[in-house]
Image: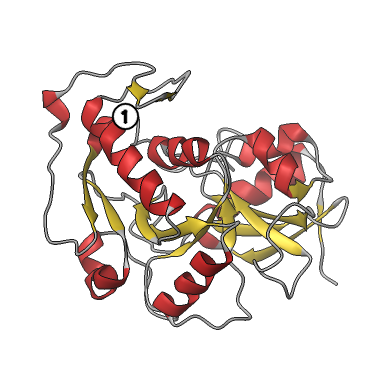
Amino acid sequence: MVSSARVRAPERRSSLRHYISVQEASLQSLVRIQPESHPAVIGSPIGRRTIGPASSGFGRDGAEVLNSTVNALKDGQVVAVPTDTIYGLACLAQNSNAIKKVYDIKGRNGQKPLAICVGEIKDIYKYCKVSVKKELIGDLLPGPVTLVLERAEVLNTDLNPFTPLVGVRIPDQAFMRRLCQMCREPLALTSANISSHSSTVAVHEFQDLWPQLAAVVVDCRPIEDKSRLGSTVVDLSVFGKYRIIRPGCAFSSTVHVLEHKYGLSEDTG
């Protein structure tokens, strides 16, 4: 029995000040950002764009990390990023060439789908057709859960062209949410590893992939969930039903929310 209906990853990422580096191009140099050196500033301007309103603070160096990562993504590159569960590879979901790069880097089977990652719950309604209550989504996201929904027509047809469904994530982590908000479009997201290899919780664990990446974002606080199970993946595309595709790290709490709070029944068909 869980004490709260809301699904959450371990409490850990409250400020962008904890992201210590972006390694660009050849990944040969680190620009260290010391958390204690830069006090938090709400709504710090980044070039001509302002990130905000923000509930968590970030200083100038955190803004530079975000800017560098956004620039790499906008340039059609693939970057490695920390999430609330494991390290991931990300690119712009609407960029077909970038999606192909992700599959090539991982050696991933082309019939295995990529999830998308957005910054806010309202973004889900743009890229997915939602048949569950908004309150249900709010109880699961942001958090270590991937919701599989029917995809909307606006989503890139080269992303998972073999299925009418798409998994969507909002990690419970400030950096990833800000990154999606700044890109103003969804990211395609998958684990930072060679396909079929173990998931990674530290950047050195996927060092073999570095030469193929435009940037690696390093969180100086390690990912606390060492299970390497990744997010819980649940299919909510059938009205009134749910189907667990991958138990992941939040299985029990997710099922509790779906069954006991919203009365969904498991789809066993």
**Name of the residue lying farthest toward the right:** 239
Q: Quadrant of residue 133?
A: top right
Amino acid type, residue under disc 1 in the picture: Ser
Question: Percent x, y for residue 40?
Answer: 26, 19
Q: How many marks?
A: 1
Question: Percent x, y for residue 70?
Answer: 40, 45
Task: Pick the quarter of the image with the C terminus.
Answer: bottom right
Residue at image position (42%, 55%) is 75
Q: Is residue 206 visible?
A: no
- Against 49, residue 267 (above or below) is below
Q: Is residue 267 found left or right of 31 in the rendered image? A: right
**For this rendering, which residue is in front, 223 or 174?**
174
Residue at image position (24%, 76%) is 208
Task: Pick the quarter of the image with the N terminus.
Answer: top right
Q: Is residue 154 visible?
A: yes
Residue at image position (31%, 60%) is 214
State the scheme by which the image is colored: secondary structure
**For this rendering, which residue is in front, 13 or 69?**
69
Q: Is residue 26 found left or right of 251 in the rendered image? A: left
Q: Quadrant of residue 32?
A: top left
- Residue at the spot of label 1: 15
SS at mark 1? Answer: loop
Question: Percent x, y for residue 30?
Answer: 12, 51
Q: Residues within 10 Å of mark 1 (few under 14, many from 20)?
A: some
**For this rendering, which residue is in front, 170 or 7?**
170
Question: Percent x, y for residue 189?
Answer: 50, 59
- Against 24, residue 123 (above or below) is above
Q: Is residue 187 found left or right of 137 in the rendered image? A: left
Residue at image position (75%, 52%) is 154
- Against 217, residue 111 (above or below) is below
